[in-house]
Amino acid sequence: MFKKVLIVYAHESPASFNAAAKDAAVAALTAQGCTVEVSDLYAMKFKAAATTEDITGGLKDAENFCYAKEIKLASEEGRLAEDLKKEQEKLKEADLVIFQFPMYWSSVPAIMKGWMDRVLGFAYAQEKWYSEGIFKDKKAMLSFTTDCPESVYSDTGINGDINVILCDVEDIMPHPYSKDATSQWPPGLQALTSDIMKTLERLILDQLRPIVRPHLDPLQFAYQLRLGTEDAIIYLLNRVYTHLDQH
């Protein structure tokens, strides 16, 4: 079972489904005896751009600046910016890392991509990939929301297979982590994901059930997308949620 968990969270609204998923994960993991730390990137005003400001004490080759080389040297010599040091310490201590985010343009939000760009560099080296990664005993998980039903992101869906869309993001994790970082979940994590889904389902039912019925008739065009019954219901709920959020 995991002892320490880091949740890298990227959403500005505390009323979002992402926030609910994050809170459910914290509650479920804490109840199982885990120590959970959350890096709330927007609240932290985390700097997304990888720049020379990430390095203290001067550059080794300012004329031919190469971020990857300079950040590696700075990491080895203890010359990283304080925000990077803090995030890297969280990462080193965690047994499980959960990335919680809304999918933006088929990827993670820019602020989370910036976290990956700036924080993970110290773990990369040709001899430290996959089963030899310095985090080979850790687990990593993507937990995210989309604005479309599941069928839209299937291998025959209009947006394409979600596993293909996010393959580049998923590929970031196995290099410094173990190759099976996103598979072979122990029972504790399987229970966690079940708890999260139950919590989100309850939130949807409690908050939307009283107001969904009046909107069902004018929104029945969802079936024009050739969705199955369950996906059509999800689509309708999403449209209602979007409508309410705009008013």
Image (cartoon, grey):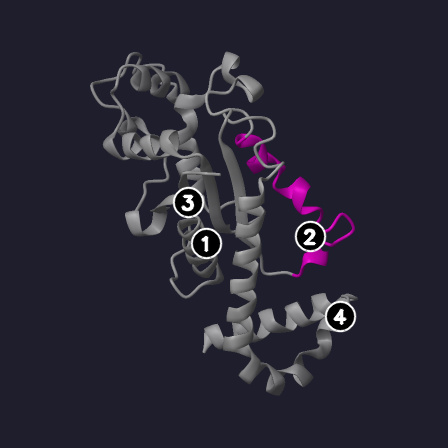
Q: Please tell me the numbered disc located at residue 7.
A: 3
Q: Amino acid at mark 2?
A: Tyr
Which stretch appears magenta?
A: 149-173
**Residue 107 can be seen in this image:** no
Foreground residue, 119 or 205?
205
- The mark closer to the camera, 4 or 3, is 3
Q: CA distance from mark 4 to mark 2?
A: 16 Å
The residue where tag 1 is placed is 28
**Residue 4 counted in the magenta span:** no
The residue where tag 2 is placed is 153
Which residue is at a point 39% across and 16% down the rendered structure image?
69
- The 10 Å Cα crowd at callout 2, few under 14, some 14 to 19, many 20 or more, is some
The residue where tag 4 is placed is 229
Compared across the picture, whether 237 is left or right of 28 comes to right
- Establish if 4 lies above or below 202: above
Foreground residue, 14 or 67?
14
Q: CA distance from mark 1 to mark 2?
A: 28 Å
Q: Earlier in the sequence, mark 1 or mark 4?
A: 1
